[in-house]
Image (spheres, helix red, strand yellow):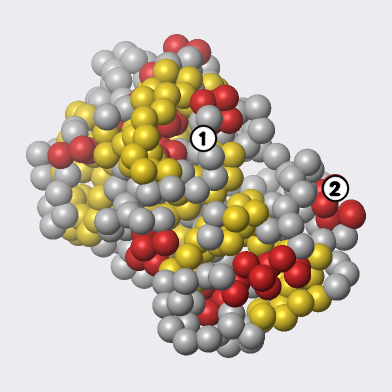
Amino acid sequence: MSAPPRPPNRKSPTRIPGLPGQPGADNPYLEFFKRFFQDRPELPSEHQTNSLGSGFILSPDGYILTNAHVAQDADKIIVRLSDQRERPAKLIGVDEMTDVALLKIDGEDLPAVKIGDSDALEVGEWVLAIGSPFGLEHTATQGIVSAVGRNLPSGTYVPFIQSDVAVNPGSSGGPLFNLRGEVVGINSQIYSSTGGYMGLSFAIPIKLAMQVVEQIKSTGEVTRGWLGVLLQAVNNDLADAFKLDRPRGALVAQILPDSPAASAGFKQGDIILRYGGEPVEDSSQLPRMIGVTPVGKTVPMSILRNGEPLEIKATIARLEATEETVSTMDEYSDPLLQITVADLSNEQRRALGADERGVLVTTLDEGPAANAGLYPDDIILEVNYTPVKSASQFVELVKELPKGKAVPVLVRRDNESLYLAIRTPEQG
């Protein structure tokens, strides 16, 4: 639901694979593990792939929690208990957005874990992970909580627990314990450029996982609330441009058609500061807050519009799907911002729908526009709250901008809208 500026080339968290030897195939110890864990004859007619992951028993009647990426595509699931007994498991349900899967095995009086309070975790607290890295069962590793509520690109709806507990392939789905022996998380991801552990691991908070479990048990699926806005973070320049006292809140970069936000009267450039009475300090908080809101509930929100506070209410709908848009005439150069723009073609305007605004960024030199994060092929929709309808008008608008100030610029990029703050030169 967010539309961030185009990021630099950086490594993203890598999901922990279940099978040894997938990423990091140049590991010198792989042959050792292959001999002991994969040394079995293969059928000549077809290739059978076995995957390995971890999990834990939630209740004595056999409900088991693990990761969605461990269990969701399996044709057959076998659970090996701590006493080496093996039992077939049924996949009750999965939720890819949180990477949670619920399994069920037959049994009575099975040893179940004690569920803790993930909300009470603090940075610096010791935690313990148990899993089967590389097939080595009942492996325990320890570390401390490095951060809580960590937002990752791969987990919009998950406020991850970050720790330095060592986890490796096969650890996915295993429990993360606090020092009281309570499960506070599910080991899910690592940050890695090689596929192996590099000091950062991420776990799904158990409170969130149990909310997912209850929905799967009761309805067989997970539903989430939907407002219908694309959001971006507010940095220092944007806070200055939008007359905000400091960087906070969630900036509405785009409003989806036929959405609760459109019906409620939201506008591009609104900054959501409170949701249902709760402060929104960072844009990454809001999707999670909306996601857990019951469908059909009307939620009051405090926003900032054109520097003025405003209260607005929206009735939350059910999250369903996404949408698409976007796909060159006379060029105009602006020496102040060091940018060249062109009018959109008819085809491009049709791709934008009924919205007739916009000019295409064709080239950029080193200067204010590039420093603000604009890229070639961006479409500039507004400058300082004024709609841009032609390249020539854009140049005239720039001439009227206040000198030495940060001004908001609304941009369409890769089918999504976002705001950038361009700081004009003191002289020009």
- Category of crowding for the residue at label 2, using alpha-carbon neighbours closer than 10 angstroms: few (below 14), some (14–19), many (at least 20): some
Query: Is 341 or 44 nearer to us in this picture?
Result: 341
Q: CA distance from mark 2 to mark 1?
A: 24 Å
Type of the residue with mark 2: Arg
The picture places residue 93, in percent across and down from the top left corner, at: 52, 25
The picture places residue 247, in percent across and down from the top left corner, at: 32, 58
Q: Secondary structure at mark 1?
A: loop
Residue, x 76% and y 62% (percent of image)? 390
Query: Is 188 or 129 nearer to us in this picture?
Result: 188
Query: Residue beneath label 2, please?
Result: 350
Type of the residue with mark 1: Phe
Q: Is residue 58 left or right of residue 13?
A: left
Regarding residue 13, the answer to whether it shows in the image is yes
Label pair 2/1, CB-CB below 8 angstroms = no
Give the number of marks: 2
Query: Is 423 or 138 nearer to us in this picture?
Result: 423
Residue, x 42% and y 61% (percent of image)? 241
Query: Is 207 or 176 nearer to us in this picture?
Result: 207
Residue, x 75% and y 68% (percent of image)? 391
Mark closest to the chain's N terminus, 2 or 1: 1
Q: Is residue 135 left or right of residue 58?
A: right
| Among the 4 quarters of the image, the one containing residue 343 | bottom right
Q: Is residue 34 above or below residue 231?
A: below
The picture places residue 225, in percent across and down from the top left corner, at: 48, 26
Q: Is residue 362 above or below residue 211?
A: below
Q: Secondary structure at mark 2?
A: helix
Q: Is residue 18 above or below residue 289?
A: below
Numbered label attached to residue 266: 1
Q: Is residue 257 above or below residue 23?
A: above
